[in-house]
């Protein structure tokens, strides 16, 4: 295992050293063995795993004490300068043994920090289960997401207003490329601290966004924003083609690497609905499914405002103008990818994608079913029409889409023979299913439905080629 202490390069203005909570129990509920092997931790015994990820004994060569990161952020577009890691911390950094990337191990529910704001710093077990399910499903659907690395039940009774209380507690560890957020930049822009912003840009480029490396400082800042815009456009497009609603797109929840993370009231769409929201408290639909692309751009504009202390406004505005076309390209490419097709070029892909969304809206076909039925293209027509959504495959919008779909060929024809595509229905993760998974855990401490669902997700990921069969989620 290779480790690093890169966050110390930034200096103490960027974090607070903290101590983890001491929990009365440590019951291992989930370990992501596939990703543990990939970062050199696959050989840990369960006792060693709990020691590191439940009791937070330091990993060799990494931090002696965890770091609670400092940041600000817009929360539902209201600026909040009193933020930071309030129930989590950066526990360790290590390297991906496949591609050499520096990765973070961060926590959720690991106790109070200077940024807890009178909260208890804990995570409910149900919240941890939901995050494991969200990240596994998103990874299988091809979304660039943080990975739920560990979930340990901690034996405390928590009181919450949004679920029956008292409820069980847990601590989650997530694996991600970085925990640098747009809100991290906002903190130093708010303080008008240009030297700290310069260190932050240079650090982010060095450890996470190498394509932005430039010798000139102004050019490096502009290239950094351009890279972030491209990555966030890709993330937003991946959410849309996965039918995913994040729910809380505050600036402190947007990672500069374009890696989806920090899952609270998430949902997957039953059918295409731009107004579909995930958070019960999102009364205005600010973060509704169809508003996610525009919301991401709004957040990127906030990042560009921070960078005005470092680079010319006209150059930053030029970069921001590229977000919408980049998102459209990524959205079309995402539709092609999810349908298992070989691209026919930007123009053809854009036309087919546009017709596809029009068909979804007109037909109200089950969202995940349509990708499943037509994976591989028009050659799947007979099975699609005979399947449970067959009645939806008719009408003018469908005919238009089919005409544009017809010339496409499967990207990997061998995938069509996978046993997953011999079923009549796809693996899904609707809110009703999440509740069915949680019910036996809550009532009888029965984890079999949870484990079965993770196995189904791994099977789907193997079929799509997003999860290698030998390293499934939850292995």
Image: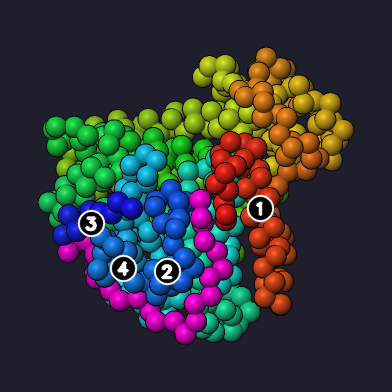
Q: Earlier in the sequence, mark 3 or mark 4?
A: 3
Work out how far the residue at label 2 is from the one at label 3, CA to CA, in angstroms.
Answer: 22 Å
Q: Which residue is mark 1?
A: 455
Q: Which residue is mark 3?
A: 5
Q: Earlier in the sequence, mark 3 or mark 1?
A: 3
Dot 3 alpha-carbon crowd within 10 angstroms: few under 14, some 14 to 19, many 20 or more: few
> What's drawn in magenta, residue-wise?
12-34
In-front residue for pair 472/236: 472
Q: Quadrant of residue 361?
A: top right
Secondary structure under tag 2 reads helix
Q: Which residue is mark 4?
A: 58
Q: Earlier in the sequence, mark 2 or mark 3?
A: 3
Q: Is 471 displayed left or right of 414 in the figure?
A: left
Q: Is 177 displayed left or right of 463 in the figure?
A: left
Work out how far the residue at label 2 is from the one at label 1, CA to CA, in angstroms.
Answer: 25 Å
Residue 124 in view? no
| Residue at x 28% of width, y 74% of height | 18
């Amino acid at each position: 295992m290779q480790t690093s202490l890169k966050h110390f390069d930034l200096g103490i203005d960027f974090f607070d050293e903290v101590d983890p909570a001491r929990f009365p129990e440590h019951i291992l509920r989930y370990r992501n063995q596939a990703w543990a092997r990939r970062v050199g931790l696959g050989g840990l015994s369960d006792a060693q795993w709990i020691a590191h990820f439940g009791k937070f004994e330091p990993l060799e060569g990494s931090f002696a004490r965890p770091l609670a990161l400092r940041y600000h952020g817009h929360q539902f577009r209201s600026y909040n300068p009193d933020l930071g890691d309030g129930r989590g911390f950066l526990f360790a950094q290590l390297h991906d043994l496949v591609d050499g990337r520096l990765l973070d191990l961060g926590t959720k529910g690991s106790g109070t920090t200077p940024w807890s704001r009178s909260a208890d710093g804990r995570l409910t077990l149900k919240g941890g289960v939901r995050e494991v399910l969200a990240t596994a499903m998103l990874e299988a659907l091809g979304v660039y997401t943080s990975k739920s690395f560990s979930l340990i039940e901690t034996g405390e009774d928590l009181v919450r207003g949004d679920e029956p209380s008292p409820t069980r507690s847990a601590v989650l560890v997530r694996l991600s490329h970085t925990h640098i957020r747009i809100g991290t930049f906002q903190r130093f822009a708010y303080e008008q601290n240009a030297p700290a912003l310069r260190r932050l840009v240079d650090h982010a480029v060095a450890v996470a966004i190498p394509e932005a490396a430039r010798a000139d400082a102004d050019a490096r800042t502009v290239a950094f924003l351009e890279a972030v815009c491209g990555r966030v456009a890709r993330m937003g497009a991946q959410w849309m083609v996965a039918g995913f609603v994040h729910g809380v797109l505050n600036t402190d929840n947007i990672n500069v690497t374009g890696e989806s993370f920090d899952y609270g009231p998430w949902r997957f769409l039953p059918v295409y609905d731009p107004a579909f929201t995930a958070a019960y408290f999102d009364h205005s639909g600010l973060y509704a499914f169809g508003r996610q692309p525009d919301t991401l751009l709004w957040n990127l504009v906030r990042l560009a405002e921070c960078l005005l202390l470092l680079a010319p406004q006209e150059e930053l505005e030029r970069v921001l103008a590229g977000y919408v076309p980049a998102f459209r390209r990524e959205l079309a490419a995402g539709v092609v990818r999810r349908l298992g097709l070989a691209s026919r070029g930007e123009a053809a892909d854009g036309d087919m994608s546009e017709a596809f969304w029009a068909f979804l809206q007109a037909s109200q076909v089950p969202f995940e079913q349509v990708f499943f039925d037509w994976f591989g293209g028009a050659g799947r027509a007979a099975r699609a029409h005979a399947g449970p959504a067959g009645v939806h495959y008719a009408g003018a919008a469908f005919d238009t889409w089919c005409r544009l779909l017809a010339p496409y060929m499967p990207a990997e024809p061998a995938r069509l023979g996978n046993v997953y595509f011999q079923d009549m229905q796809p693996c899904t993760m609707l809110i009703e299913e999440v509740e069915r998974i949680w019910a036996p855990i809550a009532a009888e401490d029965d984890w079999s439905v949870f484990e079965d669902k993770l196995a189904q997700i791994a099977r789907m990921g193997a079929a799509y080629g997003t999860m290698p069969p030998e390293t499934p989620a939850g292995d």
